[in-house]
Amino acid sequence: MVVHLRQVLYLGAMENLEHLIKERRTVNQFKPEKVDDALVMKALELSLWAPNHKLTFPWEYRVVTGEKRRLLTELAVELKKAKNGGVFSEVKADAVRKNLAAASHWVSLGVHRSENPSTFQEDQLTLACSVQIASMYLWDQGVGSKWSTGGYTLHPKTYEILGVDPQKTHLMGMLLIGVPEVIPAARPRPSLDQVLK
């Protein structure tokens, strides 16, 4: 039997895809190294190929830099302090700042609001698919990511800091991107027969 080159390439691509799906991890600790801007932009560009019912194109991405990033970092510290009843040492505050600063890129994730609840839900699901595409592409390039929905990514002050109109845009967290410092071990997944009915 003759195996055509195209079939070989296809099988290789499918093996690589399976590997990416199983090996990608959410990264919580990054090295303080810069990731190429073009690589991040490519990941976001590819994310727009996610399934999108009715082609509403609801995505709103914002790359967060400079003063806005500093203000959001301080908001994260404030919220941690409040969560701990105001008892939060400067050492812990600095650890939060250092952890957030290590990520090379922050991308705020949002979707357009819709008067139709069904469309709004579908648009949020589209964003989730988009994040997975971007994260898998980055992982394939040796770059980690974390979709954070921590308080500082969704707080009313976050809308103010980013200049986002909450009547028009619904924030859905922050995609933190960077070089992995630690790659978490895989956690067991359920078997298919546990979830397939």
Image (tube, rainbow, N blue to C red):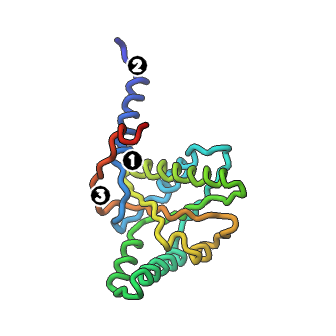
Pick the residue in front: 140 or 192: 192
Q: Earlier in the sequence, mark 3 or mark 2?
A: 2
Pick the residue in front: 47 or 190: 190
Disc ID at residue 116: none
Q: Position of residue 111 (x, y in %)?
A: 62, 58
Disc ID at residue 4: 2
> Which marked residue is nearer to the observer: mark 3 or mark 2?
3
- Looking at the image, residue 130 sits to the left or right of residue 58; the answer is left
The vertical placement of 30 against 90, above or below, is above
Graded by Cα atoms within 10 Å as few (under 14), some (14 to 19) or many (20 or more), the crowding at tag 3 reads: few
The residue sitting at 42% across, 29% down in the picture is: 10
Graded by Cα atoms within 10 Å as few (under 14), some (14 to 19) or many (20 or more), the crowding at tag 1 reads: some
- The N terminus, quarter of image: top left
- Looking at the image, residue 94 sits to the left or right of residue 159; the answer is left
Residue extending farthest top: 1
Name the residue that disc number 1 marks.
140
Q: CA distance from mark 3 to mark 2?
A: 39 Å
For label 2, the SS is loop
